[in-house]
Amino acid sequence: MIEIDALTKDYLELTVVDHVSLTVADGEIAVIVGTSGSGKTTLLRMINRLIEPTSGTVKIDGQDTRAVPAFELRRRIGYAIQGHGLFPHRTVGQNIATVPTLLGWDKQKIAARVDELLSLFQLEPAEFRDRLPSELSGGQQQRVGVARALAAEPRLLLMDEPFGALDPIIRAKAQSDLLAIQKRFGTTIVLVTHDMEEAIHLGSRIAVMDKGKLLQYAPPAEIIARPATPFVAELIGTGERPFRLLSLGKVRDLVEPGPAQGEPISADASLRDAYAECLWSGREVLPVIDADGKIIGRIRRDDIARRAERPQ
Amino acid sequence: MSSIAITDRHPTFAIDKLGVLIAVLAAVASFLPFAAFRANRIVLGEAKGIFAALPEWEAAVLAVVLAAGIGIALFRTPTVWRLATSLIVLALLFIAIGHAGTFLTPPGDRIARVSPGAGFWLLIFAFALLAADAIARLKLKPWTRLGVLGVVAVFFAVLLGSGTLNDLSILREYFNRGETFWREAQTHLALALGSLAAATVVGIPLGVLCHRNSRLRVPVLNVLNAVQTIPSIALFGLLIAPLAWVAANVPGASAVGISGIGAAPAMVALFAYSLLPVVANTVVGLEGVPYAADDAAKGMGMTDWQRLVTVQFPLAFPVILTGIRIVLVQNIGLATIAALIGGGGFGVFVFQGVGQTAMDLVLLGAVPTVALAFAAAVVLDAIVEMVSPRGVERED
């Protein structure tokens, strides 16, 4: 658990982060979203003390982050950044092994961990272990960057626009990979982005920042339904609200028994995708299949539309 | 695509741009004096063309080879041919100048002098240019380049050892001062390498400090820049007074070799000149380290020292080494001036030669200096390339 209390950063006259307080529970993904200059990156970098706060405290699992030397603190916290920041002169394997090596793990354990992570990120260990980062595609480099951040099994992972440099298709894949891995390890994640779409997709809670202040900190559905300030509403985009709400739900939530015609839709697809399919194919109902491809029922367009209405 | 195919099919009709320059130079040089004969060491020379300087058949062979060499340089020919041609012509030129020495010196004459003429030097320059161009175009691997350097060194060792060049005036001068030559060679190397070592030991940490502390960077680099602008002779001279004072007033200073003249001020001056390239390249190299990699290193919990040693320094090292290369080549040249204040080195022969208007003696100092600087440049360039991590793109 991370408890941030009245955290403040001043640069001379300028207050970049202004008395921000928020708590991230274990296993949550907290996404800090804001425009550039909102102080979101500064807030993130104060958690692992890459930036020292002017005032306020950060506690991780009840312990003040200032109780240990900064470098020791950072070795316990995963750190992944935009443009991956891989060491260009070291192989993929050496890059991933960075923190375990700093912690003095023995060689065998490190080698095993490197291979485990490479497999986890769908990079064949024998093929990729000894390559240099420059020999990888952008998406592969980004995956290695996240693998490196997770190498020492941190309970907390900080990510600064980790998918910012990726094209939309690879980006969507990287996001779903991250969700899968987060589910598997139960890692607590604090992620910074300027993209509200990404925040809603990934966040279990979203912190909206503007001009150094925390405007709202709430689950995505509540941010969409009840934006605390006009700025938050603007960030969501009023025209986008119903669709953003739909993107939070899964087809599985609205399945009902009964027949339907045409191309089926996966139970794990978002309601937004199902609605788009209804509109595009001109159908009132869609058959729903589960992961095995078996039809488990149907979903009705009207039911989906009702979910897009403003929650009361 | 088709135009490339056409030029490939008719390579002999295409003219090589650099080849034109080389061919013109070599053609002009062929008609300039190949060697100069003088009755003694200091009288004015008598110019001899290729056919006057060599036995008839040797001159004819040389003329034919030169003509062929000019042809190969002029037209667009395979690069390997160009390299082979240039090396063969260069080797022949050196053998020919040795033979010219023997041919022109009357038997038993120990006073007459034969030295290479303007034509010889210009031919060497033209075909060395061809060789350098071919080597650059072949994009030889560092080890291959070192191999070529080794072959050249062996060639000269064999040539000198065989006595082919013994009748040339530069070697006459050498035989007159064999022991001194090697002693000065040692001094020269000690000055150039010693000052380089000192500059590296001081300069790299200073560069790291300047990188980390931007307030230090500007004044330090400005001071070192100012030092570089002091004319070398002036700097050597300026150091005489303070070092003489130190020698006279600091106990033990003169015992360890510090004095106003001699090797100490020379060493100090060379050290001062060496600092700027080392410090500046260290700063530039460290600044070229990608920000994201450095930030990630910090964010993952490396200490400042670990970050410097495992990330920043390896990535900056090729640039730092480039600075060291500049310093070494520069120092080998500059160390000649040390002789002016009694510091020794090859400069001793240069200044004696100038004083006696004996150009051969000047050459005895200058030729080894140039050869050393050249070899140092080749070796360090190869090392820089070998240590540059593959796959690291850096914007210089």
Image (cartoon, helix red, strand yellow):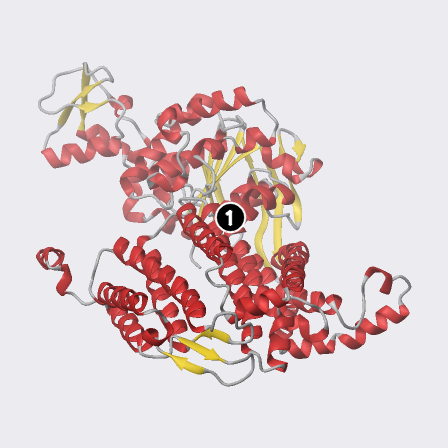
* x, y percent for residue B60: 27, 68
Picture quadrant where residue A203 is located: top left
Residue tagged 1: B315
Element marked by disc 1 = helix
Q: How many marks?
A: 1
**Image point (35%, 56%), residue name:** B135
Taking the spot 65% from the left edge, 37% from the top edge, the residue there is A65
B271 or B334, nearer to the observer: B334
Left or right of residue A282, residue B46 in this image: right
Pick the front one: A249 or B50: B50
Q: Chain of mark 1?
A: B
Instruction: Give x and y (percent) for residue A40.
Output: 50, 48
Amino acid on which the number 1 mark rests in the picture: Leu
Where does the N terminus of chain A fall, quadrant-wise?
Answer: top right
Residue B133 seen by the camera? no
Q: Which of the image's four quarters has the C terminus of chain A?
A: top left
Q: Name which residue lies at 31% across and 36% down.
A: A172
